[in-house]
Amino acid sequence: MKNINTELLIVGAGLTGLCTAGILSGLGYKITIIDKNKLGEPYFKTGDSRTTAISEGSKKILNEFGFWKKIAPYSEPIKKIKVCDRKTVNKIEFSNDKVNENLGYIVENKILKKIFYEKITKCKNIKIIDEFDVNYLDTNSLHISIKSEKKIINSNLLIAADGKFSPLRKLLKITTFEKNYNHSALFLNILHAKNHNNQAFEIFKQSGPLAILPMKKKYNSFQSSIIWSHNPNFIKGIVNSDNLNQVIKNEVSHYLGNIKKISNKKIFNLSAHINSTFYSDRVVFVGDSAHSVHPIAGQGWNLGIRDIHSLFKVLKEGKELGLELGNNTVLRKYNNKTFYDAFILYHITDKLNSVFSVENILVKKLRNLGIDYIDNNKTINSLIASYAMGKKINLFNWLKNTSS
């Protein structure tokens, strides 16, 4: 059996794993990234056609590490967001008037993966091993080891970026807090006639939220991405029927005009989770392997980017102090920096979904009052927009300033 030694081992070559490798490459450590799939350029070209919403805060992190200039040409800015409760008259409109800043950016996942992959293939300190299926893990005082049928990899630190249903989390017996929403999310891309004017919509329907996100033009047609949360049987039924175009047209033609083409249909069961801890001996969890949230606010991947940035900073600080890579004090600091952020977003998205799902008359009236208040209160509206953009908000100082 072949033995491989490395300093930093990243498990998972998805969006988060590739980004982690690209960002941490600047620390100078010998990095190995593994994945169970067969990787390479064809894999990323024909891969994930879903979209990712990148916040202004995440853009700044990506820019810091030289990625944004390559991503920017493929991104479509979100300049306005309209949140509607059942009807378009019950709405909140968010915008940002600052030059060179937007509420967010929409990019196809396969574009991001390709850019991250190209970056890491040019880094001499990064080795990529594909078709590696982890079936055993062992930790001692010197290193952590993982094993497949043919290889053993020894590393000072393992970064779990192996997704929402992380096999590593199960091997390490890390407990999670979970929420199953008993809904499915339908993802699809639409070519349409009406100009989206860089406006996104979040429409809270009785059946579940429906998001419309502006994408780059394609074939000289305007394009948007749709994420629709609904009963699983309903979603499966329309996707496998001849009525899909008509159903989607009924839901979104008011916003997008004539629907020309629907493509890249995917269905996912909706659930959320958060690990009880984001670290173990010589192991840290990033992105979906640590937490997943309801897609209601489009903030899941941005939370993962903040994980990666926090990990970069604590590892850099640890290296400058001469601490051993994999030191538990450093890993605990990473956990303390990231856990609260994820815990808060986990609950915000969960409670938002609950509030907008209720059909009780009193709750509906309270919702309408709250929507009107936020839409007409520039200070609160700006605060929520800033949070969505990934800016750090000191709520205590904000409350102090508004009350004085």
Image (cartoon, helix red, strand yellow):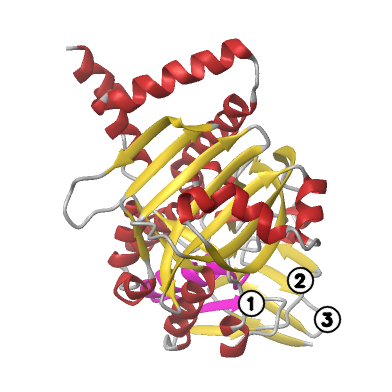
Which label's residue is closer to the chain start, 3 or 2? 2
Q: Which residue is mark 1?
A: 34
Q: Is residue 121 magenta?
A: no
Seen from the viewer's position, the closer of residues 190 and 73 is 190
Image quadrant in which the C terminus is located: top left
Which label's residue is closer to the chain start, 1 or 2? 1
Label 3 close to label 1 by CB (< 8 Å) = no
Q: Amino acid at mark 1?
A: Ile
Q: Is residue 29 magenta?
A: yes
Which label's residue is closer to the chain start, 3 or 1? 1
Q: In the visual, does 85 lie left or right of 166?
A: left
Q: Judging from the image, what secondary structure is the residue with disc 1 in?
A: strand
Label 1 close to label 2 by CB (< 8 Å) = yes
Q: Which segment did they paint magenta? A: 12-34
Give the residue at x 41% y 72%: 217
Q: Amino acid at mark 3?
A: Glu
Specify few, some or many for label 1: CA neighbours under 10 Å numbering under 14, 14-19, or 20 or more: many
Q: Quadrant of residue 158?
A: bottom right
Specify few, some or many for label 2: CA neighbours under 10 Å numbering under 14, 14-19, or 20 or more: some
Q: Judging from the image, what secondary structure is the residue with disc 2 in?
A: loop
Q: Which residue is mark 2?
A: 134
Q: Quadrant of residue 47?
A: bottom right
Residue 332, image x and y in percent?
51, 46
Q: Quadrant of residue 396?
A: top left
Is 118 rendered above or below residue 304?
below
Query: Mark 3 against mark 1, which lies toward the viewer?
Result: 1
Residue 137, image x and y in percent?
75, 65
Label 3 close to label 2 by CB (< 8 Å) = no
Q: Which residue is mark 3?
A: 149
